[in-house]
Amino acid sequence: MKTILLPFLNFSESTSGRVVPPSGFTAQLTVITSAAMAFLAVFALALSMATGRLAERWGNELARGSTVRISAPAEQVDAQVAAALKVLETTPGVAAARLLSEEEETLLLEPWFGPDLPLDTLPLPALIDVQETSDGFDAEGLRLRLAGEAPGAVLDDHSRWRKPLLRAAERLRFLGVLSLILIAGVTGGMITLAANAALAANGQVIRTLRLVGATDRFIAGAFVRRFTLRGLSGALIGTFLGMIAVALLPSADEAGSFLTGLGFVGAQWLWPLAIPVLAALVAFAATRVAASQTLRRLM
């Protein structure tokens, strides 16, 4: 009997792997779950990074530019525009200031009202485009100066647009991180169920191994190795497919559209490569916990 069992008692990795069935629904469940969760993780990561890029782009553009709007009676507009431009030229932190033409104002309003609206018949305010230096200017001080020199001038430094955008970006980033955590939790839960099912199905084999001298550490290690490799292989497949799907999405356009900028840029393509490693770590931890608990029940 011992002669027959001697090859079985060689506790090498290849022999220990025989404790876990090489096929069956547990193997399929582990690989499919890991692949699906890795695929979703790639998109959650892409969403989070694309949101950050878009918010940074819009925030920088809004931070560098401001607008002075002048609403005054027709006979006073030119005088107030000249006064406002003079104030802006002498304001520290203002790189350039210029009055927008009627054609430029029409182009700005066209996306909202359409090209057929007779904007030339409307009393449009005069708009001055203000570009800041890297140091910026004192917005409150400039408002006070404009109020004294050009009472109809209103400074819009775009802070009311920039702050909600940054808040929304932070929340979307948080949702992206939360999605990754939930994906890792679901992956760990499914692998735990699969490992428990495999351990329960091989209860008789485990008892036999104990009779011939196998330790629980050896038995648990066999399951941990097999399910870690399954989780890693499934995550590699899902990550590869996810990266292909993200690469096929439309690239970002000049207008900064969110739906055409969902993806990775430059070195960000390296981040999805960490997903299979994290999936393997989750599978390792989940299987070790499941094996320890199940082996204690089979005492």
Image (cartoon, rainbow, N blue to C red):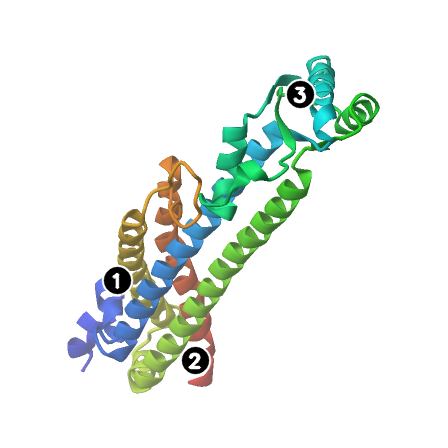
In terms of secondary structure, where does tag 1 sit?
Answer: helix
Q: Report if the CB atoms under discs 1 and 3 are less than 8 Å apart.
A: no
The residue labelled by disc 3 is 135
The residue labelled by disc 2 is 294
Quarter location, residue 198:
bottom left
Locate residue 181, reporting x and y percent: 50, 61
N-terminal-most mark, 1 or 2: 1
Front residue of 199 and 10: 199
Q: Can I make out residue 1 in this image? A: yes
How dense is the environment of label 3, judged by Cα within 10 Å: few (below 14), some, or many (20 and up)? Answer: few
Is residue 1 rendered to the left or right of residue 231? Answer: left
In terms of secondary structure, where does tag 2 sit?
Answer: helix
Q: Does 75 appear above or below 125?
A: above
In terms of secondary structure, where does tag 3 sit?
Answer: loop
Q: Does 63 appear above or below 204?
A: above
- The residue at 48%/50% (across/down) is 48
Q: Report if the CB atoms under discs 2 and 3 are less than 8 Å apart.
A: no
For marks 2 and 3, give the one nearer the viewer. Answer: 3
How dense is the environment of label 2, judged by Cα within 10 Å: few (below 14), some, or many (20 and up)? Answer: some
- Amino acid, disc 1: Glu
Picture disc at residue 13 = 1
- The residue at 44%/47% (across/down) is 258
Q: Quadrant of the N terminus?
A: bottom left
N-terminal-most mark, 2 or 3: 3
- The residue at 48%/42% (across/down) is 110
Between the residue at mark 2 and the residue at mark 3, the CA separation in whole angstroms equals 64 Å
Between the residue at mark 1 and the residue at mark 2, the CA separation in whole angstroms equals 21 Å
